[in-house]
Image: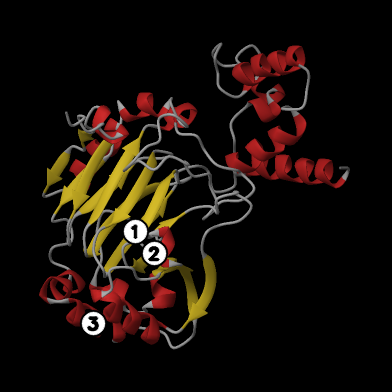
Amino acid sequence: MQAEPVPSAAGRLPPPTPIVEHRWVDAARFADIRAAGQPAVLRNFAGHWPAVAAAKRSDEDLIAYLRRFRVQRPVSVLIGLPEIEGRFLYSEDMRELNFARGTSPLDPFFDQLLHDRGNPRPHALAVQSEEVPNLLPGFELENRTDLLGPAVTPRAWMGNRIRVAPHYDLMENIGVVVAGRRRFTLFPPDELKNLYAGPLELTPAGTPVSLVDVNNPDLDRFPRYAEAARRAQVAELEAGDAIYIPFHWWHGVDSLEAVNLFINYWWNDRPPDAGSPYDALLFAMFAIKPLPDDQRAAWRAVFDHYIFGANGDAAEHLPPHARGILGEATPEQLGRMRATLRQLLERL
């Protein structure tokens, strides 16, 4: 008697929830989408872009369109061996990343993308997070969105069938699929506990990434991922579609075609003079994490009171002139705090 096949881990998990979709999104409607605090797919958001029209005709037409704008200087390129199957992550022993960084002019990079389309096991190739005005000057003038102000610089992501592990950005994000197809798998920020983040010191792109392969999760190694999977949201985008990713939402991205181009817009509404919360996290690792349990518990109460407002306004009992750093975070106040922190760090 033949044994029944054992279902994969992914098959034993509940299907992810489809990301809510919108069409004909203008500034007013986008404000409502942001206020909801949830991811959103913006169908045919950039269907009128000339670059999207070129991509829909053919890969060759897209590349010919991009060559009109390309810079001649070398750009940073990520390359991985065929064995990684496009999944940029870590080596087996997690002592290093499983891909290399190099440089190349755009023309040979474009040529390689087109050449490798028929190769079932190509090298993984990617140009990532390049500012469009510096990479393809003029592209941003012909392909633009009115939802964001001119201060938000578009960035380009190009490559073949790349798989980016779930990670979070310290920004809000609108991303536009110009060429190819992309599948996005998203998780709320508080799923950190169930996503098994990798090292903070060694990351593929700056912030920690999940070690879980969301397409084939190893639930023996990562059992809590089953909880994250219950809250996963997913969408597949085609050329012209866009996605809104709220601040700090985890997102894994699979590029599904041999030639892909993605344009994204990052922004953050925090005060421009404020410091980086991620820097504060790293300093807390140095100053608070090594403390005994009772001391860390005391500091948690202090942070809850002064930073997270767990007990209301911590300075309401003080007259305005005495509130100091507990008061309004004006540029002047933030400047004084920066100077004080600089002096403190110099003592370390």
Q: Residue at x 30, y 42 (%)?
A: 185
Marks 3 and 1 sit apart, C-alpha to C-alpha, by 19 Å
**Residue type marked 1:** Asn
Q: Position of residue 111 (x, y in %)?
A: 32, 84
Examine the rendering and report whether any part of residue 38 can be seen: no
Q: Is residue 225 left or right of residue 242?
A: right
Q: Position of residue 52 (x, y in %)?
A: 17, 69
Task: Give the secondary structure at mark 1.
Answer: strand
Q: Which residue is mark 1?
A: 264
Task: Give the secondary structure at mark 2.
Answer: strand
Q: How many marks?
A: 3
Residues marked 3 and 1 touching at CB (< 8 Å): no
Name the image quarter holding residue 155.
Answer: bottom left
As displayed, is residue 33 above or below residue 102? above
**Residue type marked 2:** Arg
| Residues packed near mark 1 inside 10 Å, few (<14), some (14 to 19) or many (20 plus) | many
Q: Position of residue 302 (x, y in %)?
A: 68, 17
Residues marked 2 and 1 touching at CB (< 8 Å): yes
Q: Which residue is mark 3?
A: 65
The N terminus lies in quadrant:
top left
Q: Which residue is mark 2?
A: 155
Marks 2 and 1 sit apart, C-alpha to C-alpha, by 5 Å
**Residue type marked 3:** Tyr
Q: Nearer the viewer, residue 96 or 265?
A: 96
| Colouring used for the render | secondary structure
| Residues packed near mark 2 inside 10 Å, few (<14), some (14 to 19) or many (20 plus) | many
Q: Position of residue 295 (x, y in %)?
A: 76, 15
Examine the rendering and report whether any part of residue 71 can be seen: yes
The C terminus lies in quadrant:
top right
Q: Residue at x 58, y 31 (%)?
A: 328
Task: Give the secondary structure at mark 3.
Answer: helix
